[in-house]
Amino acid sequence: MRAAALYSAAGSLLLTTLAAAPATGAPGDAEQTGTTLAAAHARAKGIGFGKCPGAQDMPGTMECGTVSVPLDYAHPDGKQIRLTVSRARATHKDPHNSKRRVPRQGSLVYNPGGPGASGLYFPLIGMLPEWKRIASAYDLVGYAPRGVDKSSPLSCVDPKHFFKAPSQSPTYPSESYKKERVAEAKAYARGCAKRSGGKLRFYTSLNNARDLDVLRAALGEDRLTFMGASYGTYFGALYATLFPSHVRRMVFDSAVNPDPEQIWYRDNLDQSAAFEGRWADFREWAAKHDDVYGLGDTAEKVLRSYEKAQAQLAEKPAGGKVGPAQLQGAFLSAGYYDDYWPHSAAALSAYLKGNPKPLIEQAGPTPEAAVEAENSNAVYTAVECNDAPWPTDWSVWDRDNTRLARVAPFETWDNVWMNLPCAYWTAPRQQPLDVRTVPGELPPVLILAAERDAATPYDGALELQRRLSDSVLVTERDAGTHGIAGGANKCVNGYLDAYLLEGRMPERQAACAPHAEPKAVSPGDRSHRTPVKESVKGKAAQG
């Protein structure tokens, strides 16, 4: 399932030989031994941190380096790939007491999700007020996972041809449209195999977990302190299952349902269903502010305004590049983050009143980001297709999603097109690992979840808590922002700080009241902050 790449701060957006994986999903001895050897080598070598590439655009507090990991952990002395790593050292400054020097607690490693997202800019988060206490005690460490960015990047199509705009997004696609998309999915799967070659099979969540252990060792840490958001919670949970004695503290923010039966086909179905509820939340909010946006004073009337824009864009794309699919992508972003709601509603309102510029700015493709977006999409596809079996019969996809679209039309079919290459994948498939620990095996871990999160539905957090003994769940009630650590909810942040800084957490579960809803902003007001536009490609990767 695909989730937007995210940084859990104030709602801002700033993977074993597969054929050898046993049917139980248990990792092979060769890969376990290979990980141990690779970690020992990395620990001896360390990471030579220095100036970051493109350092002119970065604060001087951040430094970069690389760590080598085996492409295939069954052959740790074989081909190596280099992961790019970033770090900002602990500041030792107590933001509430300038005279107190805060002792360093080690490295906090972060993954923002995806699959296919880079965490290289994560260390800069320490400059935000909500993160200053954590930044005082920890070296903040981010990295680009295998396949991402400069870390042996994957590609499935020529980036020049990645963005296709304007394009359609039928809620109830015709048979001829479905045939076109099936052909595109087959071509995309062939492109991944052709452009990535034999290395494609080694981009998996299990290898992401093994890479994380090598990174831990390279940082000189005996035990890992880790925060994973969205998809990062899934391979973080794999890590906890594979290497429980290597864990110090772990935070899982917006958890993927790790049940092997869910990975990844059913997780995607659940996500599509959940987005319908979040789409309704947005429409109800816009209706409450009809005096500002004029989209209708009920959720149903707001839906009709959206459908009117869809129809007009199908007939005449805005600026020649924003069609129905681009409109849907923009509003899918609003399903992830409620701080998108004001500018999404304002753009729709302006478009319907004859001003397409805000919608073009928000939803139009950005050619300068094509290389990054194509790479991210390739990694997402490779990891999820490699991770688990998928239905290979189109009639199964068609049946399941036709049924689902009757009650959850907003994201269902766009989610299908995002994942359909997995039906035609040529690389070997794994059986997902059974994420599970027994009491006392793993230190207590903290799970954070918003009750109405659509990208990673709340049931996933409950399932993860059941599977990881001694884990504690903190829930933000009646809220749906994807990624809540270090964000707008002070209650959530209090639990996060207490855990990371002092090792304290509630007995078993805790709940926080929701953060405040965003304030409506007039379509003509350009003074408000516009959220950074992120490519959320019609889908969710549960993380």
Image (cartoon, rainbow, N blue to C red):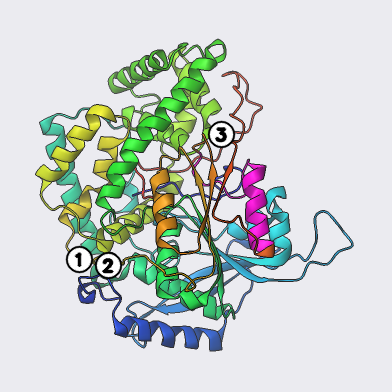
Query: 223 or 153: which is nearer to us?
Result: 223
Mark 3 Cα shell of 10 Å, populated few (<14), some (14-19), many (≥20): many
In percent of width and height, residue 323 lies at 33, 28
In percent of width and height, residue 340 lies at 52, 33
N-terminal label among 1 and 3: 3
Say which mark, if any, is on residue 427: 1
In the rendered image, residue 497 lying in the magenta stretch gets the answer yes
Q: Are marks 1 and 2 in contact (CB under 8 Å)?
A: yes
Q: Is residue 258 above or below residue 306?
A: below
Residue 79 seen by the camera: yes
In the rendered image, residue 184 lying in the magenta stretch gets the answer no
Q: Nearer the viewer, mark 1 or mark 3?
A: 3
N-terminal label among 2 and 3: 2
Disc 2 target residue: 200
Q: Is residue 16 above or below residue 468?
A: below
Element type at marker 1?
Answer: loop
Label 1 and label 3: CA atoms lie apart by 39 Å
In percent of width and height, residue 137 lies at 71, 66
Mark 1 Cα shell of 10 Å, populated few (<14), some (14-19), many (≥20): many
Element type at marker 3?
Answer: helix
Magenta-tinted stretch: 481-501
Q: Residue at x 36, y 65 (%)?
A: 435
- Identify residue type, mark 2: Leu
Element type at marker 2?
Answer: helix
Name the image quarter holding residue 60.
bottom right
In percent of width and height, residue 479 lies at 52, 36
Label 1 and label 2: CA atoms lie apart by 7 Å
Mark 2 Cα shell of 10 Å, populated few (<14), some (14-19), many (≥20): many
Q: Is residue 431 left or right of residue 235?
A: left
Say which mark, if any, is on residue 339: 3
- Identify residue type, mark 3: Asp
